[in-house]
Image: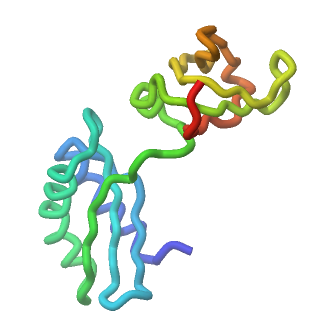
Amino acid sequence: MAHPLIPQILEVAAPVAELIDLEVVHAVFQTNQSPPVLRIDVRNKQDDTGLDDCERMSRALEPLLDELIPDQYVLEVSSPGIPKTLTSDREFVSFRGFPALVTTSEPFQGHIYWEGNLIRRDETNVYISKKGRTIALPRAIVSSVQLTESEE
């Protein structure tokens, strides 16, 4: 269960991130530690998220959070890392060429699991390359696209 301050923290953090061209992906307040740790994951909207992005967010956000959280706490701003399951258009662009497992909700050409290198996603299909052949999987039946360790 999320800490009760998380909605207020996100209300404060989101506009700050927007001003410096970042987006807040996730926040968790771990009050079982001493001092409590507030971790906020941010993503750079234009490029890979770097240490500079996390530092800029931390410096911009800390004074505002100090007003919201009166007690001592540790603020950690970090990148969310590589997602296992791809959902956003940006992730599909970022991980083009990476090995992926596409799962469909119903059989397509006799299969529900498709492994290959990710090519792209458009309004109608998710495209992968399998053994040099492009396969277009109807987006309407794609239930998940996950990065894998294996290669074609």
Q: Where does the image place residue 58, in percent across and percent down from the top left?
A: 18, 63
Q: 149 or 112: which is nearer to us?
A: 149
For the rendered model, the colour scheme is: rainbow
Residue lying at the far top in this picture: please name it. 133
User: Does residue 85 sit above or below 107 in this rendering?
Assistant: below
Q: 108 or 43: which is nearer to us?
A: 108
Residue shown at 18% from the left, 46% from the top = 19
Viewed as shown, does residue 1 lie left or right of 88? right
Viewed as shown, does residue 95 lie left or right of 129? left
Label total for image: 0
Q: Where does the image place residue 81, in percent across and percent down from the top left?
A: 39, 50
User: Does residue 4 sit above or below 128 in this rendering?
Assistant: below
- Give the quarter of the figure containing the N terminus: bottom right
Residue shown at 81% from the left, 20% from the top = 108
Quarter location, residue 149: top right
Q: 66 or 119: which is nearer to us?
A: 119
Quarter location, residue 85: top right
Q: Where does the image place residue 87, in percent across and percent down from the top left?
A: 54, 37
- Give the quarter of the figure containing the C terminus: top right
Residue shown at 27% from the left, 62% from the top = 77
Viewed as shown, does residue 102 lie left or right of 13? right
Residue shown at 49% from the left, 29% from the top = 98
Q: Where does the image place residue 86, in percent across and percent down from the top left?
A: 53, 37
Q: 124 or 132: which is nearer to us?
A: 132
User: Does residue 40 sit above or below 119 in this rendering?
Assistant: below
